[in-house]
Amino acid sequence: MNAYISSFTADLIGFAGMFCIVSAFAYSNVAKAMNMVLFNLTNLAGAILLTISLLVNYNLPTLVLEVVWMAIALFGLGKEFMRRRQAAA
């Protein structure tokens, strides 16, 4: 991926990802009623963007963290969609 994205562009993508994750965290602390789909999608998007950045500006521990972050967000989305499906039945 290094041949297609410059280090600077990767940093910008990483900053966008960081903004998503920090925004989701802030939202979780101020929302009166959390929208779990919005929360987990925002976290997932942030982790994906940071992963793209890390594929250019490689850092293994942080890359592993982002993979775990994506897995947790996907788990949360799955759990929420199952809850909604059961509530609709």
Image (cartoon, rainbow, N blue to C red):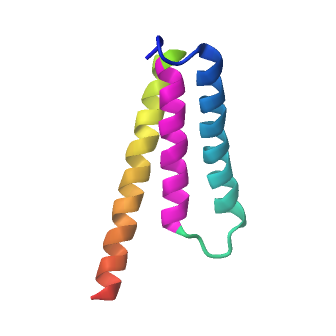
* Residue 59 visible in the picture: no
Q: In this view, does 68 lie to the left or right of 49?
A: left
In the image shown, does 12 or 32 lie closer to the viewer? 12
**Residue 64, quarter of picture:** top left
Residue 61 percent across, percent down from the top left: 48, 22
**What secondary structure prevails in the magenta region?**
helix
Which residue lies most toward the front here?
Answer: 4
- In this picture, which residue range is highlighted in magenta? 36-55
Q: Residue at x 41, y 58 (%)?
A: 76
Which residue lies most toward the bottom here?
Answer: 89
Q: Which residue is drawn at 54% across and 25% down?
A: 53
Q: Inspect the magenta stretch and tell me whether residue 57 lies in it.
A: no
In the rendered image, the quadrant that contains the C terminus is: bottom left
Q: Which residue is drawn at 72% across and 65% down?
A: 30
Residue 78 percent across, percent down from the top left: 34, 61
Q: Inspect the magenta stretch and tell me whether residue 39 lies in it.
A: yes
In the rendered image, the quadrant that contains the N terminus is: top left
Relative to 35, does residue 7 appear above or below in the rendering?
A: above
Residue 23 percent across, percent down from the top left: 67, 51
Q: Which residue is drawn at 54% across and 62% down?
A: 38
